[in-house]
Structures are given as structure tokens and as C-alpha cells.
Amino acid sequence: MITEELDDTVKDRRSAKASSALPNLLPFVGGSFAAWSGVETEEPMLRGCDQRGLLDRLAAKGIRHLVVPLNGASEDACLFARKHLDAGAVVKAGSIALYDLERRDEGAFTRLKFLLETARSAGIMMGLSLFDAAPDLAAGPFRKGGNLQGLSLANSSTTQANEKLLATLGGVVDWVCSAARGFRGLWIEVVRNASGPVSAIEKLLSARVAETLAKHGEDLSPVRLGPWLAPRRSDNLREKHATQAAPFDSSRTISGDTSSIDLSAALCRSESISGATETEIYFQRVPRRQPVLLRFAQGSLDGARTDWLWRAFFRGYWPMVALHVQQTRDARQLETIAAISRFAVAWVGRGALRPYPELLAPMQPKASSSIFAAEDGTGRFFAHFSGPAESGLALALPTGFYRFYWIDPVSGAILDQGDGAEGGRRVGIPGCGDPTAQLLVLEQDESPDPLAVL
């Protein structure tokens, strides 16, 4: 058995052919490539949080994409000034906050500016999500009776109310955009958890973000690294704002109770925003024009369904999970995202993954039910197993010669490898004796050793 870490020698060997053919699809932030997969949490904005320590822990795991939701249920992550309706000087559990939407909380804004600086020094790509459009919010500045101005994110009944809401939200946009000036690897999302057509207010606020970012100066680097606007529908942007749009789609969200449905049903629900059909979702062979984030809302994914993250990744999505980074109950999801991020940087930086069930064609349906496969369009094929892959398997590979690697998805270590698998027919791949091997990578080799061909 061969145990080998993903060192530069191994990466140089398998990327030599691809390096000159395709550019890397991953952004280069802070001296390292950052996978688009990541986590969404408000913890860095909480008072008393060691922002540097938290971001360093994420970076050490390989997670370099962080989304911070602002102006939601957590007071510490809200930029508006507030007072509490109970008379005590200390905020008590159960006390009700009343927000003033015309003034900002300087403490929260200072924490935000420190967070941006920390992310830049830690090499973390970060997204700021400004407002939550979920209709059932029971907390936060826009709940019923939650602010002095009496405003709500729901569609107002009068033009005057809409104008007042637009002016109020526009002020927050200006605050955040001013803090984002000059930062690379940063994107701003106006509204999260929205559904249906893009509202007029959302369009106007998106245009305001784009115009404000444009005034801060153009990024003249070969691969633009932001700051970006992440619109829910990029086709709603005017042409002059298109250059400020993020190079990914952030509109796919899986939320609510998913215990009674499978991932396919959840994806169909999330894709309905863009009007895609089931055939386009599952059988499309053309690589996506840009990365698509698949965001799992808080509570939509439990520890027993973390294989959904790998399945989504192998279908061409980049999973983002809303979780509590420092709580043990979410540790399994965090480790899975970390494994996907490390694997993506090491193996899938030059091609958009898409499902490739044909790889498993020679196998019996029962045997392949717990295996899913993908390709990247650059001569690499991938298979993920829900359990140890100790026995051999038969695959259907296109014509060519291949080397294979058995990988531990948690550590990223190569546990075993071999050369000489010949495609164009039923190919037998020996299993791996290590029970932690759950990932198989097959890489096309244009110049194999003819004596090694099986």
C-alpha cells in the first residue's frame, strides 16, 4: 500500500498536461487558491469573538470562503442602532430590541471593518449578505414592530413607503460599500432567501452597489478579484454594471425541512428560480459558464446527510453550509466542507464538474446505488463511495490510458495508486485495503508506460 501526501511533486505530475490548456477556475486570494465551497455564519460578528483565531482555524482546514449574514436575527450582526424595551442597562434574555433604521451601530460597524481586515490578512474570500427577505422572520430589525420607522422588507402598499424603504436600505448599502473599498476577494449580496421575480427595490439597490464599487477604482489584474456584486439574477443588471458582477451564481438555496425529500427534489426546488428543467439540471453535459453556489440554510442539513454535500459537488455545484463553526453539533458538516475544499484545490481547479453516471454503467444497480461519479472535462473522472471501497470495481472509461488514485476524503492523503488502466472497455480497478478510502480519481495519461498496461 502506498500512502502519499498531496505534495507539490504529485500535483506537478498530474497537472502538467492541464496547466497549459485551461486557466485555473479558482480565485487566487492571499497567496493561495480558494475553493468556492465554504461556510455561512454570523459568528465573526459576535461581540467577544476572536476573529483572527476563527478565520485562521478555517484557513488551516482549507476553508477559504466565508459568508457573513448581516441585519438578521442576531443583534451583534446588525448594523442599525437599537435600544431595548426593558429598563435594565444589561441586555437580558428575552428582551426586545427596537431598531432605529436611520442610525448605525458604530460598534457593529467597527467589528465589520476589523473582520474585513482580518479576512484579507488570512487569505479568506468573503461575502457580505445585507438583508434577509425570509417572510417568516420572528426577530431582526424588519420584523413587525421591530423598528421606529415601521418599515418592512415585504412589498409596501404605497409609493411613499417604498421610497422610504429604498432610502433606508440605500444608506446601509453605502455604509457597507465604503467599508469594502479596495478589498479583493470580497462580494456583496443585497438580499438573501428571496424567491420569485426580482423586485424593483432589489434591482435599484443592486445598481447602487455596482455604481458605488465602480467609483472605488477598477481592478486591472488579469483575473479580477472584486469587490463584486452578487446579484440574484445577473440578467437584470444594466450593461454598465456587468463588470462589477461576481463570477458566480449565488441564488441557489436549499432551506426548510428536507427530511422527507431527497437531494434531487431539493435541487429541483432551488433551480426553479432560474426556470431550469429537470433535464437541464441532471443531463446537461456542457460545462457551466460560471460556478454555482448551492447554499444550505440553517437546519436544512443534519449530520446524517452530509453526503448531500459531496453529491452536490459532484453535480457541479459548490456547497455552502450555514452552521455554527465553534459548536460540536455542526462539526461533521464543517469537516465535510473542509474536505471538499481541499480536494477541489488539489484536483478540480481547471474544469467544472458535472455528473457522469456512465462511469458506473458496468456495475449492478444495487452495487452503484451508494456511489456517484463525475468528470471535469479535462480527462479526470471521480467516484465517491458512501463506505469503504475495499473490493475492486468495474468502470466504463472512454478510450485512453489512465492512472488512478485512492484518496481519504478527510485527510486528503493518497492511500494507494496505480498506472495502466486502459479505457474504451470494461475496466477493472483494484480496491484499496485502507477502510478510509472513499474517493477514486482516474486521470488520463497520454504517455503511459506500455509495459504497465493491463
Image (cartoon, rainbow, N blue to C red):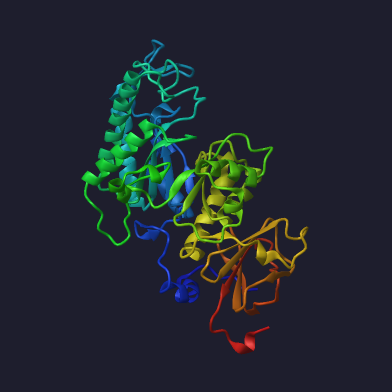
Q: Image quadrant of residue 267?
A: top right
**318 left or right of 117 in image:** right
Q: Relative to residue 429, is residue 176 depicted above or below? A: above
Give the residue at x 36% y 15%: 89
Q: Relative to residue 433, is residue 424 depicted above or below? A: below
Residue 37 spot, x, y in % from top left: 49, 51
How many badges with numbers are in the image? 0
Q: Is residue 53 visible?
A: no
**65 left or right of 180 in image:** right
Q: Relative to residue 346, is residue 134 depicted above or below? A: above
Give the residue at x 43% y 46%: 66
Quarter of the image for the C terminus: give it: bottom right
Q: Is residue 328 visible?
A: yes
Camera-side residue: 67 or 350? 350
Residue 92 spot, x, y in % from top left: 45, 18
Camera-side residue: 238 or 338? 238
Quarter of the image for the N terminus: give it: bottom right
Residue 194 spot, x, y in % from top left: 47, 34
Q: Image quadrant of residue 42?
A: top left
Give the residue at x 61% y 54%: 282
Q: Residue furthest top?
A: 87
Residue 154 spot, x, y in % from top left: 44, 24
Q: Residue furthest bottom?
A: 451
